[in-house]
Structure formats: C-alpha cells, structure tokens
Amino acid sequence: MTDSANRGLWLVVGLILMAMGGVGLSFSFGAWGEGAAHATIITHTVVRWWREGSWKSFAAAAFIGFAFLVLGLLLLWRELVPHQGRARLDDFVLPPAGGVPSRGETVVRAASLSHGLEGDLESIPGVERALVGLFGTTEHLAVRARLRVLDTADLEEVSRRAAEAMARMARTASLRTEDAEVTVSLVASGTRVG
Amino acid sequence: MRAFNRLLGMAMGLALVGAGGFCALEVVLAAFGHAFLVLPASAYLRALRTTPWSATPTRAIVAAVAAAGLLLFVAEAWPRRPRLVRIPASDGAGQWWLRRTSIESHLRRHVVGVTPAQRARVRLGVRKQRWQARIRTVAPLHLRPEIEEVARQGLVRLGAPEATTIRVRVARSRRVA
C-alpha cells in the first residue's frame, strides 16, 4: 500500500476512534440524559432483539466476524504485497518481423532486458549504480529505476541519456513504454559503491 | 512514520483476522449449542449487561479510545516533508524524483566545500512545488549572503524552481576566517 493510502486509512481510523470515544464519553457524562448514563452497555432491548432474532442473530454475528476476517486479510495482503501489487514483466515472444510468420520464435527474457537497461544507465557519466524494475505487459510497460548519481553530474544530461537508453530498450524488444519513474540519490563524488 | 504506518497496518490486519475469525467460529459453535471455546465470552457479555456507561472503568476505556483516535489523527494529519522531490527531466525520460535527504546532504557538502563555513545543517521543505531550504551554519556573519548564493546555485543546478526560498542562519564562529 502506498504511503498516502496508509495515511488516509489511519486518518479515517483516527476519526472513527475519536467519534466512538466522544459519543461514549457524552453518554457516560449524561449528555443524552441521566437515563442513558445509567443504562448498561448492552441493554435489555439488545438482549431481547438477540433472542427474538434466534438463528438470524447468530447469522448476523457470524457474518460480521467473517467480514472482519476478510477485511483483515485484505489489509494484510495490501501491506505485504511487493511493488504495490504491480506484476513484473514476464518473458515474452517477439512478434515476427513485418507480421510475416516464421518457423522459429524469439523469446526475450525480461530479466535480461532490465539488466541490459541497468548496464546502459550505468554507462552514463556520473551514474554509479542503476537498479531497474520492469512491470506490466509488453503493450503497457512501466519502468521503475533507482539511480545513484554523483553530485557533480549534470542531471539534465543524465536524464537525456537515460531517455535515450529507455527508448533503445523499447525499440530493441518492440515494447511500448507507458510510464517511467526514476528516483535519484545523489552521492558524494568521492564515494564509490561496491 | 512510513514504516510505522506499515507496521500498524499489518498489526491491524492481524488483529482483524484473529478477532473476526474467532468471533465467526465462536458464534457458529454457539448457534449449534456448544460452549465458547477460546474466549471467555460469557463473562464479557455478563459484564457488558451489568456495567453502566457512567461507571469509572467504562469512562476510562472510552476516554482512552478518544485519546488514541485524537493522537492518531494528529500524527497523520501533521504536515510532513516529502521523501522525494520532483525535478524536471528530458522528454521521454518519464518522471524524475530526487531523494530529499540526498539533496540535503549534497547541499551541506556543497556549502561547507565551497564557502569558508565550518559546518552546516540543511532542512529542505517543498510546498506547492516551491523549494524551501533552511541552512544553519557556523561561519562569520558577513558570509551569509555568499552562503545563500552558493546554496541557491547548488539547488538550481539540481533543477530547483526559480522561486526557491533559502534562509541562512549563521552562528558566529570563534575563529575568524
């Protein structure tokens, strides 16, 4: 789950807790009348509804428990799934050149593409290290890259050469790059990365 | 806060799975006439049927719930500095982001390396695409304009917008440069 989604979730949870606590306090201090303040938390009316409901009461309670279970599993999955649930690019078969069917087929390993792009990016002057993730499909490819760049490098030049490298990869493997996001960390020019 | 939110999310997910699973299981078993298995639910239900809202333990619990909600809300709503800062990039290069902490470290190195300032602390904030750098440094007072100019050049070179605000606070050094 993204940071902003997590933040939104906890803002809502905070609001709900505040509302529950506020209503509970107003109840207990008699803002809803002295009768409400001295009423028990589970009233006789609730007990009567439960008994009159018979199997429907059990079904409703079991459903609420099950809904909590599903909600918990969903939340766990959203928190634990890597790359915000995006699927990595699979190995794929290159379409025949000019649409003419051929006897063989060319399989492209997705890992070799990302390693190739990493090498291409690392050959740009000033780029010390590149890590590339390719996501989606060949028609809708998303590139996520993390670069460690020397703080003496010209970032405009680095981004221009990176655009050329991505275009080369897309052309070589007949891919359509839908979106690319590059995160840069500046490192001191004296630092070497192993 | 980012890691804390994620841990909190996992903890809440686990709690919901546990509570929901047990609740569903216990209710289904109770419907078929079995006693509660794990939770002492009979005791809890009896307590809830005899405890009034005005009882001190009830007030303490609801006050704690409200306080926890308020704390959570304030912690999440408190403005945070972004982890990544957007910078301009060439056509076809996609969106480019710089790690804020790496900009701060770079600027600190730049100021200390280029000016006679002895040490510097940099805090970078971004609001409505305007960069705001606060630099605290130890240097002779008259060097403030020079430090500001050096910092501005350093940030512009990284792609900071023209309307970047730089505030330099100089603590006078004992040694005269």
Image (cartoon, rainbow, N blue to C red):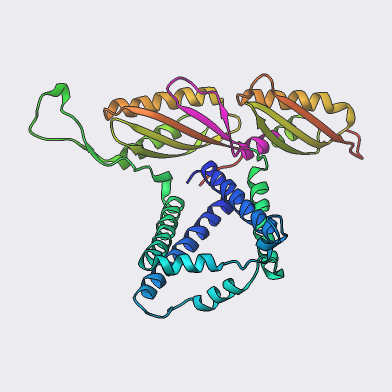
Q: Position of residue A119 (x, y in %)?
A: 40, 36
Q: Judge whether residue B157 can be spotted in this image.
A: yes
Q: Nearer the viewer, residue B52 or B113?
A: B52
Q: Which residues are magenta?
A: B82-107
Queried whether the magenta region covers residue B106, the answer comes back as: yes
Residue extending furthest toward the left: A103
Q: Residue at x 77, y 26 (%)?
A: B148
Q: Position of residue B108 (x, y in %)?
A: 71, 36
Q: Nearer the viewer, residue A84 or B11?
A: B11
Residue A131 is left or right of residue A188, and the answer is: left
Queried whether the magenta region covers residue A42, the answer comes back as: no
Q: Residue at x 41, y 72 (%)?
A: B26
Residue B1 is left or right of residue B39, and the answer is: right
Quarter assignment of residue B141: top right
**Placement of the C terminus of chain B among the 4 image quadrants:** top right
Q: Nearer the viewer, residue B59 or B89?
A: B59
Residue extending furthest toward the bottom: B35
Quarter assignment of residue A36: bottom right
Q: Position of residue A44 (x, y in %)?
A: 54, 69
Q: Position of residue A164 (x, y in %)?
A: 40, 23
Residue B114 drawn above or below residue A42: above
Q: Residue at x 40, y 34 (%)?
A: A143
Quarter assignment of residue A73: bottom left
Number of numbered markers: 0
Residue B122 drawn above or below residue A99: below
